[in-house]
Amino acid sequence: MAQSDDGAAVYFLFGLVALWFFAPDSWTNALWYGVKYQVGFDKVQTSTKPKDCDFMHAPLGDKGCSYKAHVKAYNASGALVSGEDAPKYGRDSKTGSSIISYNDGKTWDWYAGDVPDPKVASVVVFWLKE
């Protein structure tokens, strides 16, 4: 009986792998980035990956190009709080004023507003040709 359970598990895993490879990018991206940023799958907006660099796209063969996914994550008020090119926010230790860094905390500038809520509410995935 244990042997049939092992066989079922193998078929299940094979099915998951096949689904991952054959499912549209929008589904797999929604799953991946939804889990990564802890948001519902319906909160992940993703465009379809262009096919013009694919090996099987006419004319057949290596096109010498590829696309890379770029991600931006926003909080409920629409402020960019995570993903690529997202600034870091903080408070000045002496004055308590809001500060912002656009270079991963190497330098800081004064920020006119209040520090935004860092909780991600939505994610946008788009593709850029490399």
Image: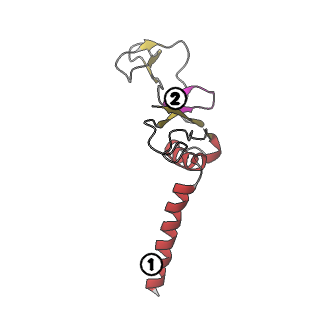
Which residue appears at 49% of the width and 44% of the height?
36
Residue 81 - label:
2
Query: The disc labelled 1 sits on which kind of residue?
Result: Asp
Residue 99 figure quarter: top left
Q: How is the image coloured?
A: secondary structure
Camera-side residue of 35 and 18? 18
Residue 91 - label:
none
Residue 12, position as x, y percentages in the image: 52, 70
Which residue appears at 48% of the width and 80% of the height?
5
> How many marks are shown on the rendered structure?
2
User: 52 above or below 80?
Assistant: below
Q: Give the extent of the magenta segment.
A: 72-83
Residue 73 counted in the magenta span: yes
Secondary element at image label 2 = strand
Which residue appears at 52% of the width and 22% of the height?
115
State the residue lying farthest toward the bottom: 1
Residue 61, position as x, y percentages in the image: 46, 44
Residue 124, position as x, y percentages in the image: 58, 35
Near mark 2 (Cα within 10 A), the count class, few <14, some 14-19 or many ≥20, is many
Residue 6 - label:
1
State the residue lying farthest toward the front: 59
**Dot 1 or dot 2, earlier in sequence:** 1
Q: Quadrant of the C terminus?
A: top left
Query: The disc labelled 2 sits on which kind of residue?
Result: Val
Secondary element at image label 1 = helix
Of badges 1 and 2, the one in the foreground is 1
Alpha carbon distance from label 1 to label 2 = 44 Å
Q: Is residue 22 left or right of residue 6?
A: right
Which residue appears at 58% of the width and 54% of the height?
23
Residue 20, position as x, y percentages in the image: 52, 56
